[in-house]
Amino acid sequence: MMNSQLILLPALAMGLFTFLVAIRLMLARVKDMKALKVHPQKGQDTKHLKSLLSEKTGWIADNYNHLFEQPVIFYVACFSLAILDAVHITTLSLAWAYVTLRVLHSWVQTTTNVVLLRFNLFLASWLVIVAMLIFGVLAIV
């Protein structure tokens, strides 16, 4: 058995990655707003703001929002495995695989936004989370 705290590293990496996407979104929005002469007050309603800015900035905004959806279950899995002392090379590898898949998903969504490729990465990341959750359940029963 390895140090259970190691599973927190991929969770922290995911959190830091989300922060980087937030910075990228902020920079893209500011750039678009300056170029398109959109007053900052228009940003009070992000749905309306999205319609005023470039499509690519919208992709980044969508991706940022997605990082608060499925990854929440990833965080639950990581913390559960740490608490259950169920961290081993397989669960740790799965956690890093998840982070890798989400980074790839973000790269696709924020650059080319090829939906089929995005979907396959999304599906693969769900399979990784399910495997992590199963290891957690097995640690209890």
Image (tube, rainbow, N blue to C red):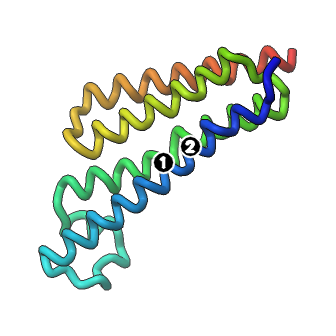
Q: What residue type is labelled 2?
A: Ala
Mark 2 packing: few (<14 Cα in 10 Å), some, or many (20+)?
few
Q: Which residue is drawn at 53% across and 51% down?
A: 16
Q: Is mark 2 on a helix, strand or loop?
A: helix
Q: Is mark 1 on a helix, strand or loop?
A: helix
Is residue 121 positioned above or below 44 on the image? above
Q: Residue at x 34, y 58 (%)?
A: 24
| Residue under numbered circle 1 | 17
Q: How far from the left and from the top, in percent, is residue 107?
A: 31, 39
> As drawn, is 27 to the left or to the right of 34?
right
Q: CB atoms at circles 2 and 1 under 8 Å apart? A: yes
Q: Which of 140 and 82 is in front in this view?
A: 82
Is residue 43 positioned above or below 20 on the image? below
Q: Which amino acid does label 1 sit on?
A: Phe
Quarter of the picture containing the N terminus is top right
Q: Which of 3 and 41 is in front in this view?
A: 3
Quarter of the picture containing the C terminus is top right
Is residue 26 positioned above or below 18 on the image? below
Is residue 87 positioned above or below 83 on the image? above
Separation of residues labelled 2 and 1 (CA atoms) = 6 Å
